Amino acid sequence: MDMKHVEGKKAGHIMMYALSTCGWCKKTKRLLNDLGVEYHYTDVDLLEGKERRKAMAEMEHWNPRGTFPTVVVKGKCIVGYKEDEIKEAVSS
């Protein structure tokens, strides 16, 4: 699966499932960038075939509704743009 890596300070494993056209996904990426943390993400809509199915299956493990953005921070799933929850999860 095509995972993008963003350098930053280590704050535990952070993974984001996003859509390239989603405003809330862009806002979440901007927040993570502003926090200066290392994270990985994939824009699921840019994947095809088996890669897309794999990404959706991984995401739906954390978020059965399959909505975006889905952010997994240190094993905790945050669905949607929730600035305070993301900040708290990253800093804890």
Image (spheres, helix red, strand yellow):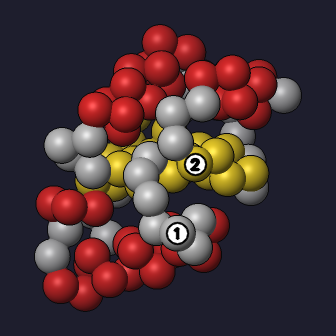
Depth check, front residue: 68 or 32: 68
**Compared to 47, does 19 lie above or below?**
above
Quarter of the picture holding the N terminus: bottom left
How far apart marks 2 and 1 lie (CA) works out to 10 Å
Q: Can I make out residue 7 in this image?
A: no
Extreme residue in the right direction: 92
Residue at the (44%, 30%) spot, across then down: 28
Where does residue 39 sit, x and y in percent of width and height? 50, 39
* Element assignment for label 2: strand
Residue type (three-letter) at the residue carrying disc 2: Val
> Within the image, what quadrant is residue 22 found in?
top left
**Compared to 12, does 63 lie above or below?**
below
- With 55 as the anchor, is 76 left or right in this view? right
Residue type (three-letter) at the residue carrying disc 1: Arg
- Give the number of the disc on residue 79: 2
Residue at the (69%, 21%) spot, across then down: 84
* Element assignment for label 1: loop
- Give the number of the disc on residue 38: none
Q: Can I make out residue 77 in this image?
A: yes
- Give the mark nearest the N terminus, 2 or 1: 1
**Are the residues tagged 2 and 1 within 8 Å (C-beta)?**
yes
Where does residue 21 sit, x and y in percent of width and height? 18, 43
Depth check, front residue: 66 or 49: 66
Depth check, front residue: 27 or 58: 27
Where does residue 66 sit, x and y in percent of width and height? 46, 67
Extreme residue in the top direction: 34
Residue occupied by mark 1: 65
Within-10-Å neighbours for mark 2: few <14, some 14–19, many 20+: many
**Compared to 47, does 68 lie above or below?**
above
- With 33 as the anchor, is 38 left or right in this view? right
Where does residue 8 sit, x and y in percent of width and height? 51, 24
Residue at the (27%, 78%) spot, across then down: 51
